[in-house]
Amino acid sequence: MKQHGFPKQEKLKKKSDIDLLFKKGKWLSVDNLRIIYLTPNDTATLDSHKTGVSVSKKFFKKAVDRNRLKRLLREAYRLNKPLYKQAFGEKSLAMLFWVSKEMPEHYSDLEKNFLELCKKKTR
């Protein structure tokens, strides 16, 4: 498998997984980026690593803007996957959120927030 890929098996899509994540997950935030995650220490039912992204319709009315932000979030995850797995573990459920009304000016700003989020978890 490619080191910097985002295959279908890693995408968080099942309603039962998402419900479990919101029921038992822990939240972390850095600036405009927020994550809810669940690790095997929190529950014994995790057997793989899955990640999802979400952008609020409340903040971004146009689907074009929401989709752009979701692409940027997935790209930040995809390119920094080894660091992410080191911080959150090989078997975890997680969902990334953008919680601001402003679009990030550059991809590098969003990626910097993502890297700070990973560093915050490892502390």
Image (cartoon, helix red, strand yellow):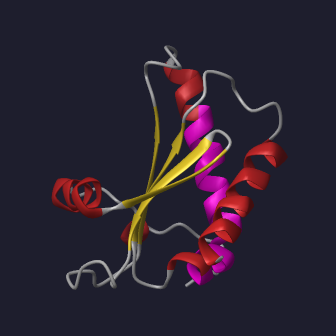
Q: Is residue 80 above or below residue 91?
A: above
The residue sitting at 30% across, 78% down in the picture is 42
Highlighted range, magenta: 68-86
Residue 72 falls in which quadrant of the image? Answer: top right
Q: Picture coordinates of residue 24 (x, y %)?
A: 26, 63
Q: Position of residue 95 (x, y in %)?
A: 43, 55
Q: Residue at x 38, y 77 (%)?
A: 39
Q: Nearer the viewer, residue 58 or 13?
A: 58
Q: Position of residue 121 (x, y in %)?
A: 59, 70
Q: Residue 102 in magenta?
A: no
Horizontal side, residue 75 vs residue 35: left or right: right
Q: Is residue 98 left or right of residue 50?
A: right
Which residue of the protein is positioned furthest toward the left in this rendering? 16
Which residue does the image show at 66% across and 55% down from the upper left? 75
* Secondary structure mainly formed by the magenta segment: helix
Q: Quadrant of the N terminus?
A: bottom right
In the displayed structure, 41 sits above or below 116; it is below
How far from the left and from the top, in percent, is residue 28? Answer: 53, 56
**Image quadrant of residue 117?**
bottom right
Q: Is residue 105 left or right of residue 16?
A: right
Observer-nearest of 62 and 38: 38
Residue farthest to the front, as pictured: 123
Residue farthest top in this picture: 61
